[in-house]
Image (cartoon, grey):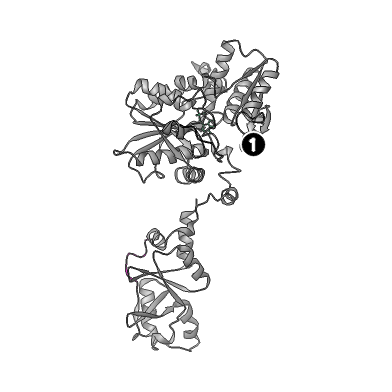
Amino acid sequence: MGMEKHNHSILGIIGNTPIIKLQNVAREVESEIYVKLEYMNPGGSIKERVAVNIIEKAVERGELKEGGTIIEGTSGNTGVGLAMSAAVNGYKTIFVLPDKQSQEKIDNLRAFGAKVIVTPTNVAPDDPKSYYSVAKRLAASTPNSFYANQYYNMDNQEAHYNSTGPEIFEQTDGDFDVFMAGVGTGGTISGTGRYLKEKMPDVKIVGVDIEGSILEPFFRTGKVVEAHSYVLEGIGEDIFPDNLDFGVIDDMVMIEDKESFIMTRKLLTKEGIYCGGSGGAAVVGAIKYAKTQKEPKKIIVILPDSGNRYTGKIFNDDWMRDNGYFDNSFNASISDVLEHLNKGDKSLISLGDDKTIGDAVDLMKKYGISQVPVISNGEIMGIISEAKVLRPLFESQISLRDNVAVAAERNFEIIDSHELLEKVADKLLDQKTVIVKKDDNLVAILTDIDILHYLQCKTF
Ligand SMILES: Cc1ncc(COP(=O)(O)O)c(C=O)c1O
């Protein structure tokens, strides 16, 4: 065979993306969650499968001719797929994007040589300024042009029926119970779902939708609700695309922006998976769905695109913080913190008020601690701390034989373990020693180092 097996363009390596099992982020459910890494496609998303099929079919039908211009209203990824195919085959491209799309996607399309037109996000689909309307108008007025129309062109769904579906079945031998994907145009869930149902009559096809979209409410109630805006790109609609076939879908799960973005970050830090926000959303959806199941299931989830399209947003700490998407760790309770640090399941080490400073130093040495409370009549009368006794001992102001009362400081506060960490942080800033009480027992001293350790573990 030699080099003949490499006799194809970049378009020849679309598909055959790997499936891996989540190791860490879904431990709260017994179901096994597997993810298909569509960002391993050469342009970084699942939409290349769609773009190539749409172009091939348009050429076959004579709708796209040599040197023609491909026009699309796209959330970005379909644009990359179309631009890639256009580059190889010599077409021109014009893309119309809503302004909530990330700058990286827009820059990426322009780098392919495409013309990119940005339209406002918060307008109705039938508004003349919407990206659907602008794309349609451009297609009508540009000579020798072809409107890819991924929402209504059934070659979108067909691409998944012919490639994503068979590929997943072959890769798994059908050894799974549930297929899940985010729903945008509906092409992925409907095409892949239709193929899988033909091969595996018992498989469940579950869509993931976002709060603010009209799709899941319609699926559940048959009613069309008013759409409202959300930040996540790729999932959810304010229209019913022809490519969405509710007949294939067994269930739908709703997710929100914040949980999706946090999961997208966790997929990178806890699994090494660098996918976009709709992948995080789909994993959140899969965990939610798994929780509704009586038996553990094997679930396959599509991760549609790459994280590198979102470096200015989801993977940017300032953006996450400014938009309120970071988990506020100070909202944790003190018992959460103790549990995290493996502290607080023993009783607190203390000593009686009849003991000497020498006894206190021995105790601190023995247990490797730096503070010890002094108990008098069942109550704490003060704290002996390593840092505070050292200098007076050196300067002979006190002696190891003195009673602990001489060096005990009253600058402490007892806080119940149900209180929020936020409260402790304030006390520590006031240089107070914080002693935690749980069910009437004193269980731990919390130090600023403890809190730093906790926050370090909780950040992404
Ligand atoms: C990033 C991303 N995720 C998910 C989807 C949804 O896939 P589909 O359009 O096949 O429903 C899209 C489609 O636009 C997307 O771009």
Q: Position of residue 395 (x, y in %)?
A: 50, 87
Figure check: 218 above or below 4: below
Instruction: Count the marks.
Output: 1
Dividing the picture into quadrants, the one containing residue 402 is: bottom left
Q: Is residue 360 magenta?
A: no
- Is residue 275 visible in the rendered image? The answer is no
Q: Residue furthest left?
A: 295
Dividing the picture into quadrants, the one containing residue 433 is: bottom left
By secondary structure, the bulk of the magenta-drawn segment is best described as loop
Identify the residue at horizontal 67%, vertical 31% (top origin).
Answer: 129
Q: Position of residue 240 (x, y in %)?
A: 51, 27
Q: What residue type is disc 1 on?
A: Asp
**In front: 257, or 362?**
257
**In front: 135, or 364?**
135
Q: Give the residues drawn in magenta, as a range.
A: 342-348
Check disc 1 and report its element: helix, strand or loop: loop
